Image (tube, rainbow, N blue to C red):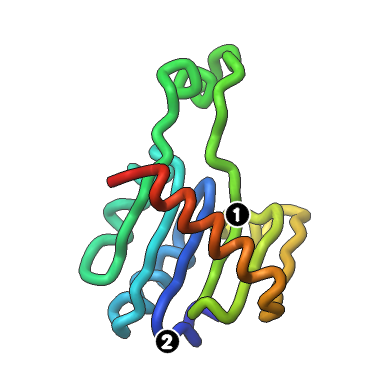
Amino acid sequence: MLQDAKRTICLASMTLSGYICAALRDAAQRGVVVRIIVNELSKAISADKLNGDNIFFKVYRHSPACRLALHGHKDHGQSLFHQKFLLVDVKFLSYGSCNSSEACFKNHHENLLFTNDQRFLQPFRQEFWTRWKEFGS
């Protein structure tokens, strides 16, 4: 699916890793504009794998209490950016429980929906741009 992108990829994911980063980087090198919304800890991990022209990030920044919870301390009720969806050329959507990681595809029992039905794409496109604006630069 990513290899078929012609114009844009919009990805919202809690985590990123490995071959997903490679596929996104390859798309950007073909001239596809890649926009990614990700948690700040995942951005720090994937930043070295995803740099260059046509790749743009928006980062959900956790509160200090949430950072502690992510490192094994008691959860203080703070929120995470936990959405997981992908829009390709505003014509195709994948959505489900799967993070953008190898473990998701190889080891876990996940669900993932693929569709080109505009009734589904439109709300996800709107959600992506709402979060893109909300998370600033």
Between 59 and 42, which is closer to the camera in this rendering? 59
Name the disc covering residue 8, or none: none
Amino acid type assigned to the residue bearing label 2 in the image: Lys
x, y percent for residue 72: 55, 19
Which residue was labeled with disc 2?
A: 6
Amino acid type assigned to the residue bearing label 1 in the image: Lys
Which residue was labeled with disc 1?
A: 84
On screen, residue 106 versus residue 101, left or right, reads right
On screen, residue 54 versus residue 4, left or right, reads left
x, y percent for residue 114: 70, 73
On screen, residue 44 versus residue 104, left or right, reads left
Relative to 107, does residue 59 appear above or below in the rendering? above
Give me the residue at 37% from left, 69% from top: 34
Element type at marker 2? loop
Mark pair 1, 2: CA separation: 21 Å
Residue 134 visible somewhere in the drawing:
yes
Callout 1: few (<14), some (14-19), or many (20+) C-alpha neighbours within 10 Å? Answer: many
